Amino acid sequence: MDKMNEIAKMSKKERLKKNVYTIEDILEYLGRWRSTGLALVCRFIVDEGIKDENVEKKLFEISDRLDQSRLEHKVYAAYRVGHLAMSTLIKLGITEEEIFKQIALDDFDKQLVLDFTGSDFWECELNEQNG
């Protein structure tokens, strides 16, 4: 927790330069939830193993954003920000059963969540050119 206190004392600009963030920063970025930025934030949450009640709550809120007709919900192909959020929760150790109990999904959407969870997205190297 000392590391988080040290990070919290930095200005937002310093945190961005050093690629370190507070939980409040992460919640702010999740609140913006546009697909590309959200994908990067979710990947950061998983890579850093950030398990925080407020972050998980925000991811559950995003999980119902599956509307195929809304462009801002689109991540890639049939994947929507809701699929990404649920996949992030699974990667953080929350069971599929728990997620699918809270978020009503048809079989197609459940399969999309599972497919995204097993995709290369979670393993590929992200850098400024591709991420």
Image: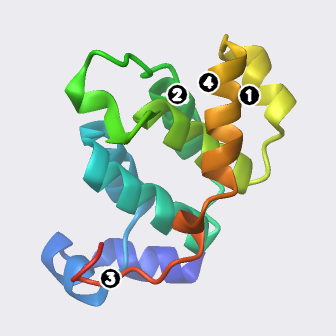
Say if mark 4 contacts mark 3, CB within 8 Å: no
**According to the image, label 3 marks what residue?**
19
Q: CA distance from mark 4 to mark 1?
A: 12 Å
Q: Quadrant of residue 78?
A: top left
Element under label 2? loop
The image quadrant where one finds the C terminus is bottom left
Say if mark 2 contacts mark 1, CB within 8 Å: yes
* Amino acid identity at mark 3: Asn
Say if mark 3 contacts mark 1, CB within 8 Å: no
Which residue is painted at 49% across and 74% down in the image? 4
Of the image marks 4 and 1, the number of the one nearer the N terminus: 1
Circle on res. 82: none
Q: CA distance from mark 3 to mark 2?
A: 26 Å
Mark 2 neighbour density, 10 Å: few (under 14) some (14–19) many (20 or more): many
Q: Position of residue 58 (x, y in %)?
A: 48, 34
**According to the image, label 2 marks what residue?**
63
Q: What is the basis of the colouring in this image?
A: rainbow
Of the image marks 4 and 2, the number of the one nearer the N terminus: 2
For this orientation, the residue located farthest to the left is 13
* Amino acid identity at mark 1: Ile
Q: Position of residue 28 (x, y in %)?
A: 29, 47
Mark 3 neighbour density, 10 Å: few (under 14) some (14–19) many (20 or more): few
Of the image marks 4 and 3, the number of the one nearer the N terminus: 3
Camera-nearest residue between 89 and 58: 89
Q: CA distance from mark 2 to mark 1?
A: 9 Å
Question: Please, is residue 43 above or below residue 67 in the view?
Answer: below
67 relative position to 12: left or right: right
Element under label 1? helix
**According to the image, label 1 marks what residue?**
99
Element under label 4? helix
